[in-house]
Image (cartoon, grey):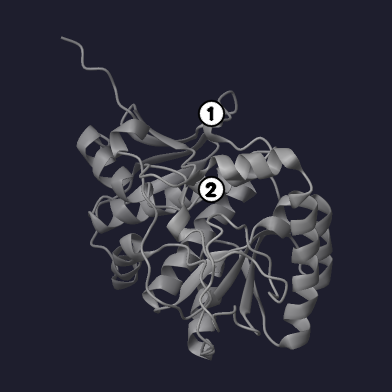
Amino acid sequence: METGYTAAQLRAAATDAVRAPSLHNTQPWRFRLRDGGIEVLADPARRLPATDPTGWGVRVACGAALFNLRLALAVAGTPATVRLRPHPAEPDVLALLRPAAPRRPTPAEQALYAAIPRRFSNRAPFWPDPVPADARWRLGEAARAEQCWLELLIGVSAVAAFAEIARGAHRVLERDPTYRAERDEWVRTEPSPDGIPAAAGGPQGEPQDLLPTRGFGGLDRAPGRDFEPEPLVAVLGSPGNTAVDQVVAGQALQRVLLAATDSGLAVSMLSQPIEVPSAREQLRQSLGRFGTPQMVMRVGYGQPGRPTPRRPVDEVLDLPVAHP
């Protein structure tokens, strides 16, 4: 495919790319067609200054969108080669996709692609059913396929040690009034194409909870619907913590999330211990892993829910101007 991608191919693939997760559902990405290639760009106007001062969350979110974009193009029979941070003078351009040789999609690509519209963060309590070994193995393989690692914390002592780190990070963040105001600004009580709908925010945290919750919706929980006492906690990490590493981690995150969705699992993300540098380092040391933790997930089985809204795809596209 020597002529490059078309505007129609970009629009079709970006429709799937925007289903990726992002902090507070800010959707901090743009997609541009340039010289037949597709570029994935960070949108600095949608970075959260208090929650994400370094832009880590933006780059992870854009990496997740990039993975969806790759999948969509592959399933359409027009796979891409990818270069990360291709233009040193343009740091907001996080990836460049160019057409590779056309081929049929693999069954694995088709299964992950079918999971894109069904993936969402489930912030409600999960059922007590344990995640079986084969599903846990599949999540680890998904991370490894994208050059990252996934550490599963299983058992009371391992989860309790993590919970202490997570609660400490949560307390640090909650003491910052700017952080709290920023979080509240992205809670939506009326229909909106971005942000977290209050109904999807999960139940209000209570003292007996093992893991901290953001409290987006502040909903009262039903009697007896406490969070699971022994959750499966998964820590995703990358070899380093450069901007490229963070984009790579975003791709791995999305692959893990789609593998979980295809396996019938529910997932919610716990980024508080990643957002506080001291907690992140404490977590890294506790795991004894080489590299940097990039996201924490709670994994299990839960009541079906629905994805959060997305902006119209044309709002995030930069297409070439048609000259008369």
Nearer-N-terminus badge (2/1): 2
Rendered residue at 47%/63% (across/down)? 121
Which mark is in front, 2 or 1? Answer: 2
Rendered residue at 26%/39% (across/down)? 11
Q: Quadrant of residue 323?
A: top left
- Residue 73 percent location from the top left of the image: 29, 51
Give the amino acid at mark 2: His
Does any portion of residue 218 appear in the rendered image?
yes
Mark 2 → mark 1, Cα distance in angstroms: 14 Å
Closer to us: 193 or 3: 193
Closer to us: 125 or 68: 125
Provide the secondary structure element on which disc 1 rests.
helix
- Residue 51 percent location from the top left of the image: 67, 43
Closer to us: 1 or 152: 152
Query: Relative to residue 78, is residue 211 drawn left or right?
Result: right
Which label sits on residue 45?
A: 1
Which label sits on residue 62?
A: none
In the picture, which quadrant includes the N terminus? top left
In the picture, which quadrant includes the C terminus? top left
- Residue 235 percent location from the top left of the image: 65, 68
The local crowd at label 2, few if under 14, some if 14 to 19, many if 20 or more residues have their Cα within 10 Å, is: many
Does any portion of residue 80 appear in the rendered image?
no
Give the amino acid at mark 1: Ala
Provide the secondary structure element on which disc 2 rests.
helix
Residue hosting label 2: 24
Rendered residue at 30%/38% (across/down)? 312
The local crowd at label 1, few if under 14, some if 14 to 19, many if 20 or more residues have their Cα within 10 Å, is: few
Q: Residue furthest top?
A: 324
Q: Is residue 315 above or below residue 131?
A: above
Q: Is residue 9 above or below residue 269?
A: above
